[in-house]
Image (tube, helix red, strand yellow):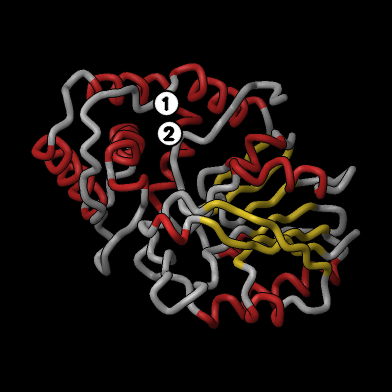
Amino acid sequence: MLTRGMSPVLKWAGGKTQLLEALKPKVPQAYNRYFEPFIGAGAFLLSLEPKSAIINDTNEQLINLYKQIKHSPSEIISIVNSLDEVACDKEYYYKNRELYNHKIASKVLDPECAALMIWINKHCFNGLYRVNSKGLFNVPYNNKVTGKSLDKDNVEAISGYLNDQDVTILCSDFEQACEDVVSGDFVYFDSPYVPESDSADFTDYTKTGFSYEDHERLANLFRRLDKLGAYVMLSNNDVPLVRDLYKEYKIESLDVKRLINRNAAKRSGKEVLITNYQ
């Protein structure tokens, strides 16, 4: 039972809502600060509600969303509600997507940008967040005409949590986000996943992507944090590369549903949960 009843405001590739019951028993019984360098939709953070946390992502729009929810929740709620007052047809969706992309190109980070991100997430195909090489959002319309795009009480609860507790919000490389980790801290890595096949690539939620070399950097960081005495947990696809990169650690396989996969036949799979502690 969540003390604030919080849930993610976005649907996100690799989101952890469905795995919370498997993840939470694996959390260390006691730890100091919580680090999540790939925050995504934040399901794990919102379920744990750590009193001291450092959250991070390289996606500027995603980090702006967290900052605006923290500082300007009423503006976000008002703008999304205004967007919802108009029945969404194809023309309306693309008009708002164009506005969102104009703000991205202009590097405008404000409450309207956060509100557009939430609204578009509810009206785009499969709730997928994907950008092109220029960093512009390019997911098509999902034909959803009406419906609420956010829960006012949920946004206010998240804002309250981000303000009441010691939560630092960063937009940087994952190694930079972990520079201050010390013994006794808990770090959860939910990075872009290693594809199960060459065609299954969901690493383009930022225009830079996430390469094989990045996965090697992440594995090396995992080892350094382990040597520091931090508690480290990592999720990824259950594929040979991941098992090889983390072969010296505890690896548990989990069954998952991939709700964002466009191919219904491939909406089930296996992930691994890797820890450096028992």
SS class of the residue under badge 1?
loop
Dot 1: within a 10 Å radius of its alpha carbon, few (fewer than 14), some, or many (20 or more) residues? some
Q: Quadrant of residue 256?
A: bottom right
Query: Which label is found at residue 68?
Result: 2
Query: Which label is found at residue 36?
Result: none
Q: Is residue 195 left or right of residue 55?
A: left
Q: Quadrant of residue 219?
A: bottom right
Q: Quadrant of residue 119?
A: top left
Q: Are marks 2 and 1 in contact (CB under 8 Å)?
A: yes
- Amino acid type, mark 1: Ser
- x, y (%) of residue 272? 69, 64
Residue at 62% x, 62% y is 270
Residue 179 visible in image: no
Query: Which label is found at residue 72?
Result: 1
* Front-most of residues 90 and 41: 90
Residue at 62% x, 27% y is 161
- x, y (%) of residue 52? 73, 39
Residue at the limit of the structure toward the left, as seen here: 91
Is 10 above or below relative to 88?
A: below
- Amino acid type, mark 2: Gln
* Front-most of residues 244 and 115: 244
Question: Looking at the rendering, in which quadrant would you find the N terminus?
Answer: top right
- x, y (%) of residue 223? 77, 74
Dot 2: within a 10 Å radius of its alpha carbon, few (fewer than 14), some, or many (20 or more) residues? many
